[in-house]
Image (cartoon, grey):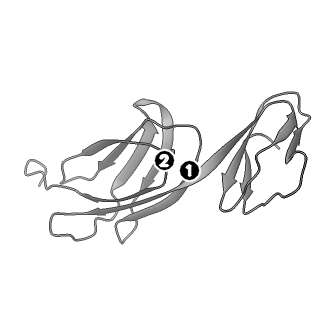
Amino acid sequence: MGTPYDYTDLNFSGNTNDVINTSGSAITVQKGGSSNPSSSEGSAVSFVSSVTIDIHVQNEAKADIATAYIYINDDDAGTAEVNTTTDANGDVNTAYAGAVTAATLRIRKYGYKPFKDSVSLAANINRTITLITDPQQV
C-alpha cells in the first residue's frame, strides 16, 4: 500500500505513538472526519487534515449552473488539486487533503465570463459564485 494513507474517523487515545513507519521512507497520512493521529516513530510521517470544498455556482438571476468546470491548482503551477464539474444543482461537494495553502480557483462555463480567485486549501471552502453572462459568447 503506497502513500498517502487515508484515515477517516479513526481515533487514537493513550498510545505512545499513533503510527509506526518501518517503510524506510517518508509517508503521508491524510486525516479525515474525526481522525486524530499526531505522533509517530520510525521514518518521517506527515499528518495532513482533510478539508471540505463546497461551491455553489449560479447566474445573475440566482439560477443554478450545471456542468460548470471547477478547477483548483497549486497557485497556477503543477497538477490540479480539484478538477470536476458542478452537478444539476450547481454544486460541487468534495474533500481535499494535502499541503497546498496558496491555490487558484477557476470556474468556467460557455456563455459566461471566466471566474478566477485565490483560495487556501488549508481550511474548508464554502462559497457561492455568481457567473456573469458574457455577451460575446451568447
Residue located 59% across and 42% down the image: 98
Residue 99 vertical position relative to residue 32 in the rendered view, above or below: above
Residue 95 spot, x, y in % from top left: 55, 56
Q: Earlier in the sequence, mark 2 or mark 1?
A: 2
Kindly indicate the quadrant of the structure image that contains residue 75.
Answer: top left
**Neighbours of disc 1 within 10 Å: few (<14), some (14-19), many (20+):** many
Which dot, 2 or 1, sits closer to the camera? 1
Q: Are marks 2 and 1 in contact (CB under 8 Å)?
A: yes
Residue extending farthest front: 14
Q: Quadrant of the N terminus?
A: top right
**Neighbours of disc 2 within 10 Å: few (<14), some (14-19), many (20+):** some
Residue located 48% across and 47% down the image: 82
Q: Is residue 70 left or right of residue 59?
A: right
Kindly indicate the quadrant of the structure image that contains residue 106.
Answer: top left
Residue located 72% across and 63% down the image: 9
Q: Is residue 10 left or right of residue 30?
A: right
Residue 25 vertical position relative to residue 58 in the rendered view, above or below: above
Count of all numbered marks drawn on residues in the image: 2
Q: Amino acid at mark 2?
A: Val
Tag shown at residue 24:
none
In the foreground, 124 or 72: 124
Residue 121 spot, x, y in % from top left: 49, 45
Disc 1 secondary structure class: strand
- Label 1: which residue? 96
Q: Is residue 135 left or right of residue 119?
A: left
- Label 2: which residue? 82
Residue 90 spot, x, y in % from top left: 34, 66
Residue extending farthest left: 135
Residue 1 vertical position relative to residue 94 in the rendered view, above or below: above
Q: Amino acid at mark 1?
A: Tyr
Kindly indicate the quadrant of the structure image that contains residue 8.
Answer: bottom right
